[in-house]
Image (tube, grey):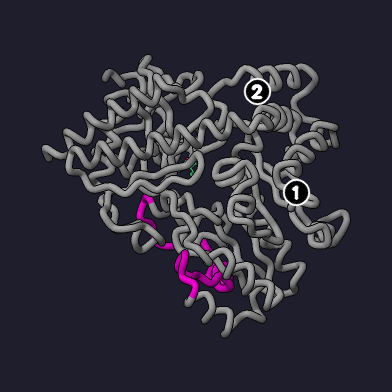
Amino acid sequence: MDTSKSQQLFSAAQQLFPGGVNSPVRAFRAVGGQPLFIDRGQGAYLYDVDGNGFVDFVLSWGPLILGHSHPAVVAAITETALRGTSFGAPSELEIKLGRLIQAFMPNLEMLRFVNSGTEATMTALRLARAYTGRSKIVKFEGCYHGHADMLLVKAGSGVATLGLPDSPGVPAASAGDTLVVSFNDIPALEMLFNQKGHEIAAVIVEPVAGNMGVVPPEPGFLESLRRLTTECGALLIFDEVMTGFRVHLGGAQALYGIQPDLTTLGKVIGGGLPVGAYGGRKDIMQMVAPSGPMYQAGTLSGNPLTMAAGIATLEELRNPEIWNNIAHTTTRLGNEVCAAAKDAGIKVVVQQVGTMFTTFFTDLPVKDWSSAKLADTSKYAEFFRLMLEEGVYLAPSQFEAGFLSSVHGNIEIEKSINAIKIAFHHLAKG
Ligand code: HOZ
């Protein structure tokens, strides 16, 4: 595969940007080789600057549930842009998108739009602290909630991919109130709540972890979180930036029937434009300025282009057939990966929830960060490179989720399965 133009651009980018990228995992450090520079995305495909095309299972890390350049989304952005790109004042589009989100997630009695998932989680925690008057927060090892200081503790995603210890630059005081428990470990959680329950403002969790690869909650885990937080007056925050509209149209809260106090969103609700949101119980949300004293603001929050792209995306998803088909295709792909692995004698565990999946190179169940990191990352790296050669673009890290869209049809799935068989065959030969 000729990647000479990408290589030239990467050389230039390295002079400008740390590691040549504007977000670490894009640098391909965990899988070797150099990142591809993308020229355009169309439907289920990404095209690089050298003209190579790939079936895309990253989809901008989840937002593009309708694929690249969906006509309805492009039309909405184009029409809106003709009337202005940012007002710094309210517009009706915010109400439309807010109501659409509420139709899928009625638990969000009130919400606020921000510009990224990091902003959403950071603010939801400030709000929980303001509401409860307590300082401590609980997160889970391997879960990633953006890069705010207090959350960069035993984090997943790029932090796990690069094997970084907790980041320098985070003052001990900022992370000192962050308590970390193993995902799915109910006894450890009960012990923590027995000891410190009255000091805890909130528990924040990816209800299906997606940033250590896909790791579903075990039966009783989310129920225990709900019970323990309620008993001690702490808030439960579901970080559904990734899982929202991905594990179920109503998010993990609908899939598992658990009502969090606050929810954070991002990705799909912006239709591929920068977005975040936090929302939940009205009595809590009314603490946000100017209704209440907890301050948070943003020049580009509720940006009309983002709102238009989000509205167009969620309008399409109102037809449940679309989402059901994506989930069905994801199941089919997962089954085919397992069958191909069995045929080739390769040990993998495929974990899938709704439209998200991860192929872990391990033969042990993956239920938390300790078991996720037993996966053979060098084998994943080789798999990634072989798949790229075969025209399939996967996440350049073992510890990220893969995503499907409504335009991943039979042709793309057949092509991908064929590529997987070839890649597994090579891996088996060693
Ligand atoms: N942390 C993001 C995935 N979980 C990656 C963002 C990016 O590099 O675009």
Q: Residues within 10 Å of mark 2 (few under 14, many from 20)?
A: many
Q: Residue at x 46, y 25 (%)?
A: 408
What's the mark number on residue 240?
none
Q: Amino acid at mark 2?
A: Val
Q: Quadrant of the C terminus?
A: top left
Residue 334 in the magenta stretch? The answer is: no
The reply to whether dot 2 and dot 1 touch (C-beta < 8 Å) is no
> Mark 2 sits on what residue?
73
Place of residue 234 in the rendered image (x, y in percent of width and height, measured from the top left): 68, 72
Residue 327 vs residue 46, the one in the foreground: 327
Tell me: 347 left or right of 413. left
Query: Magenta segment range?
Result: 161-186
Place of residue 298 in the rendered image (x, y in percent of width and height, measured from the top left): 74, 44
Q: Name the quadrant containing residue 246.
A: top right
Q: Is residue 16 visible?
A: no
Place of residue 301 in the rendered image (x, y in percent of width and height, measured from the top left): 74, 40
Q: Residue at x 36, y 51 (%)?
A: 162
- The secondary structure that most of the magenta stretch takes on is loop
- The numbered mark, 2 or 1, whose residue comes first in the sequence reads 2
> Mark 1 sits on what residue?
106
Q: Residue at x 28, y 43 (%)?
A: 380
Q: Is residue 143 above or below residue 384?
A: below
Tell me: 1 left or right of 292. left
